[in-house]
Amino acid sequence: MPSSSEFNDMLNAALQGSGVACTAIFLFGLLAASILYSQGKSVGRSLQFAVFVVMLGLFFPAIFGVATYVAYGSTTAFMENAEKADGVVVRLVESRMSEGGFGYAAVIEFTPVGGRKTEFRDNSEVCNPPCKKVGERVKVLYNREDPTDVRVDSLTSNWTWTGVLGLLTVVFLAIMSGVIWHAYRTDKYSLIFEELLDLI
């Protein structure tokens, strides 16, 4: 659970990213309308294509783009202000896997500077068979002000969500770019959903 300051940082990042995304969508829509109008299309047809195909189509990848920006900013901010510590796996607990079924998550013990031994469950890796063994040593990162805000210092733990959201952004951008291009080439100005169904 993010602290109030972390939540405010994420909210500010989301607002900033949304502002940039909306500006970019508007400019692309304006460009599309200008191109069609210069080709002899009416103002109404040009605006219809710009709004219902280009701008609406870019809305979907923009959502994932903003989410990627927020996830990247949140992870970067955490890592810049985090303390490092040595941890050890003290036990394994059964946990539900994201793809279904059950696996094992590691419970890790570490000692923050000036504090007492603390345990946390590493939900970034739930595997069957277990990804980690009891007694295995790992590096952890924790919030100086709140040692319960902790994670394993690994590529998987730190960057999984940023990577997944970034990939979804690229995939949706590629799909919607193809749909927009198809609508332009076939001289269609209907809703983006209809153009997508045409391709399917």
Image (cartoon, grey):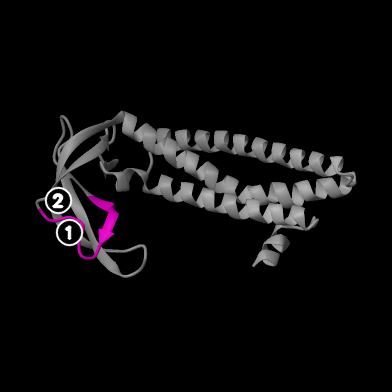
Q: Which residue sits at x=54%, y=44%?
A: 65
Residue nearest the viewer, comparing 146 with 179: 179
Q: How many residues crowd mark 2 within 10 Å: few (<14), some (14–19), many (20+)? A: many
Position of 26 compared to 4: left or right?
Answer: right
Q: Which residue sits at x=70%, y=52%?
A: 181
Range drawn in magenta: 121-134
For numbered disc 1, what is the local secondary structure? Answer: strand
Position of 39 compared to 112: left or right?
Answer: right
Residue 34 sits in quarter: top right
Residue nearest the viewer, comparing 5 with 86: 86
- Residue 132 image point, x, y percent: 17, 55
Q: Which residue carries the number 1 mark?
A: 92
Proximity of marks 1 and 2: CB atoms separated by less than 8 Å: yes
Q: Which residue carries the number 2 mark?
A: 89
| Type of amino acid at the residue the image marks with label 2 | Val
- Residue 161 image point, x, y percent: 40, 48
